[in-house]
Structures are given as C-alpha cells and as structure tokens.
Image (tube, rainbow, N blue to C red):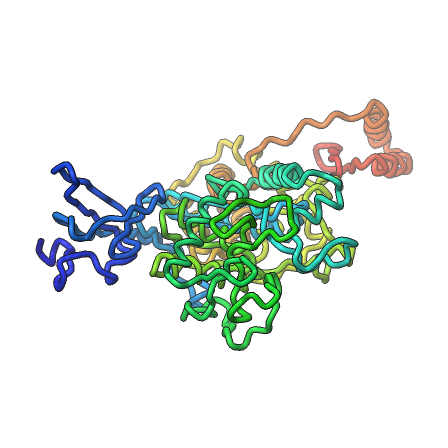
Amino acid sequence: MSEESGMDAAAGLPSADQVGQRVSIRSHDPEGGFRDLLGYLVSPTQVRKKDGQIITFDPSQIALWKVVPDNPLPTGIYLYDTKSRQDQEVVISDGRELRLYSCGPTVYRDAHVGNLRTFLLADLIARLVRGNGFKVHGIQNITDVGHMNEDLDEESFATQSEDKILTQAKLENKDPFALARSYEAKFHDDLSRLGIKSADIFPRASESIELMLRLIQQLIDSDNAYVGSDGSVYFAANTFAGYGALSGNKLDELVPGHRYEYKGHGAKRFHADWALWKAAGSRSEMVWDSPWGKGFPGWHIECSAMSLHYLKGHVDIHIGGIDLRFPHHENERAQSNSASMNEVTDLWVHGEHLLFEGRKMSKSAGNVVLLEDIVQRGFDPLALRLTFLENRYRSQMDLSWDQIAAADSTLSRWRKKYQEWSADESHNDQQAVAQLLETINKSLRTDLDTTRALVQLRAIEKDLSISPKSKAEIFSAIDEFLGLDLTRPPAAIELSAEVQELIERRKVARANKDFALSDALRDQLLEFKVTVKDGPTGMSWEVIP
C-alpha cells in the first residue's frame, strides 16, 4: 500500500505515530478470509471501535490498512479554553456532531443555584451550536459513588475518607442507593424547570464499574498506574508530563493530602498520586469485586471512563465549574490522555463561582438557596435562568433576591408584549429581522456573551422604528437559545370573590370621582397582592408574584 493510503512508510504497519487516528484495517483470518476493523488506533496493536470496545489485532496478519481522515467541521463559535488561556473556535472533530461532556452532580443533596448555573452552561453551549445548524451529542455523568468528603467534618460521623453518599445516607437513615436515586430525581426536576436540555445520556458511576475497571487495567498495563501496598490502585502522576496545563499547578509543588484526595496512608509512591480504585477495607456498602480485591472507584476515573466510552475516545468540549479545574479535571486529563496516548479534549470550558448576596453559599452560613426556594417565593423558575443570562459565564456572579424579582418582572413584561406584538397587523421586515438576529447571534458566538445579547434585545424592545410584528419574530427566534418560554400566553388568574368585589367597588368610586375611597380600595387590593393602574382607557389590575 502506498504512503498516500496511510501506511507507515518505514515498516508498512500501524505505528505509534498513528495512535489516536481513525484507521481501517483488513486482516487475514484463520479460515482464509478477511476481518475488517474500523476505529481509532489505541496502540500499534489495538483499535477502539465505535461502541467503545477495544479490539487487539495481529500486525503480521494485516493485508492492508489506511488512515481514514476525519473532516473536522468549524462552527464559527468561539469559547474561552482554560488550557490555552484564549478563545478557541469550536470544531466538530468528526465532522458529524459535537461531542460534549459535562460534569454532573454528586447526588447526596439538592443542587443549589450555584450548581445549576454550571449545569446551565452546557445547555447554552448546546443550544448555540444547534442554533447555528450543527448536531450535538451530550453526556453528563451522575456521581453516585466514590466522591469523598472534604468539607463535611462538622457532621458527627463524617470522616475525611468517607463517601459523601454513605455519609448522607447515615444522616437520613436511608439506603445509599435509594438516597442517590431520590436526589438524582430532584436534579432532573430542577433541570426541567430551568429548561435545561444539555445531555442525551446521564450515565451513573455505580452502573459504569466495568468501564472503569477496564480503563484502570489499561493504565496499569501502560505503567501509568500501580497497585499500592494497601491494595488500592493509584495513578502514577509522574508518568504524565503535561500535568498542570489546566490549573498551573506543578506536581512537585503540591501539598500532600490536597483537597478531594484519598491520602492512602503511605501506600502511594508519590504524594501527588491519586486513587483510581480504593480497597474496601472495612467498608461493606457500595463495594464491587475487582482484579485487585473488593473496593470502589475513585472520583476522577469515572469521567475518563464515561467520556472515552460514550464519546468514542474524543471530547470536543468538556464543561464544568471552575472549582473542578483542579484536581478533578487535571487528574481526568492525565488519565484519559495516558490511556489514549493523545490529547482527548479539545476545549476545556469552566463556569465561574456564584455568590449569594455577597457571600459564598454554604450550609454553615445558612445561605444555601435552592430552586424550590425561588418557586416558593412565587417567582417563575425561569427568572433564575434569566438572571444567569444577565451575567457572563466566566465572571463571578453575586445573585440576590432583588435580581430574581427584577428578572421575574421582565419575563412577565416580555411575554405580555410578545402576545401584543404577534397580534399586531403591522408589516414584518424580514431583512431587518435577519440582520438584528445575526447581530445578537454574533455576540453569542463570541465566547457566549449573553450579557451583550440581552442588552441588544432590550434595545430592540424599545426601538420604535421596528414594527411590532418584527419584534415578535425576533423574540420568538432568539428564545430558542434563551429558553425563557417568551411565547407562552399569560396564565389565566382566578380572583377570589372578595377581590373581585373590591375591584368593582373601586371602578364605581373612580366613576363617582370618590378618590379617597378609590385610594383606600387600592390599598386593600395591595394587601391581596393585586396592584391597580389607572389609564386613559380605564382601570387595569395585575397580580403581584
């Protein structure tokens, strides 16, 4: 086979130079026929197929082979890449669909609004890519085992090396798996109420043990991991030269026992090594058999195993909160790249921290806010989504009840105006609509500048030169990205008989010019959260959320 077909010029066989590339291999089989393999070269003797299965072949039996080039597809969308420290174009590496991986929740408690801001980021990126005419395949993991305590020591029986799920299960006196499923269900409810549609598959760590065991064995075979004296398996950090590219942390500068790390009681060769598989010891719940004895997976290995399997060995965009940059994403990158022998992830995108009324949210501070708290105050849950959109994802955000209330009011106004605009008989200027939508889309394609996009949308709302019909079309189209349900008709509100009587009495008082009684009735209506306005066409009323 010629060099043009992709054969190694020197040896005529697949080599380390082609690792990570897509190859087609035809080999002789023992029965005199041929066996065809198509997938990504993992080593000079192994191919990872589309379903994630790794097939070993005998190079001496190759009849012919070639590199099958992917045709990367640029999208014109730019996002800030944590690794390169600059905006990079989003490229669909296989030319078919964007492969997106988002770190999901550890399901031992309700997700607070800070967590939800990060989960929204994946949804916004997916909507933007789809809105620009491309396909997306998204994965978000569910951590239901292996995430160890680091900040729960105030609980009476929490220890530094105890699993968060087990700790909370003891607190609530529940089976750990039942507890995890209950919080997972709440997580999905919150996503639904916020209009988040970021993932196609939500694999659970507890149901992906075989994937992790295979990957761990592969890392042992490549000398990137070893079995410690305590029976746990550790990743040998010094075997990965690129460690620190995301966070800037250097291995020789790391303090032993850093946050999220399993100390290992001296079983590690180097203090910055981390556990891939932890020996069960006295632990009897949430443990599995393995070639190294009973145990459970480390936190970092699950994302490597899931992303490599479900996204076929390559991640176009990896998303998470900035707190995951180190050590979780550093460790994950080391594992995945060592197993694949190439750079697995193209872009690392991180969302910034969220404060609430000037302080970091924490249980000890008593300021943890859940989506349910917002709903209980009478606000539309999408008001929270709008407050997030008002801020750049890479900027630290200070959320407040006043912001949520203002966003809720804006939602009500826009939905009401949309109904008015869409019913208008005015001319719809299609060319102007297209130009205005492109202006907004350009802001979004520039590192997801939702702040600028909303400023532009508000300018359109106020611009008297734009016809109502055109405004309706613009708001409807951009809502495919915003996800604020702007075209939803206002819900019918049933007033109590007492409130209806007060409204009728006030109408009569206004007609009789009894302004003192009119003002008194207005104040009474306000006690029922009904506000009234007087205009040229008469009195109107509105229920305060």
Residue 429 percent across, percent down from the top left = 41, 41
Residue 197 percent across, percent down from the top left = 51, 40
Q: Nearer the viewer, residue 65 or 87?
A: 65
Q: Is residue 2 left or right of residue 334?
A: left
Q: Nearer the viewer, residue 410 or 404?
A: 404
Residue drawn at (63%, 39%), measured in percent from left and top? 177
Q: Please give the count of numbered marks on the rendered protein.
A: 0
Q: Is residue 492 left or right of residue 277?
A: right
Residue drawn at (39%, 40%), measured in percent from left and top? 430
Q: Nearer the viewer, residue 310 or 115?
A: 310
Please state, as top left, top right, bottom left or bottom right, where the C terminus lies in the image.
Answer: top right
Q: Residue furthest top?
A: 497
Residue 78 makes an appearance in the image: no
Q: Is residue 458 above or below residue 394?
A: above
Residue 507 makes an appearance in the image: yes
Residue drawn at (24%, 59%), measured in percent from left and top? 18
Residue 161 percent across, percent down from the top left = 65, 58
Q: Nearer the viewer, residue 210 or 2?
A: 210
Q: Residue furthest left?
A: 2
Q: Is residue 63 above or below residue 346?
A: above
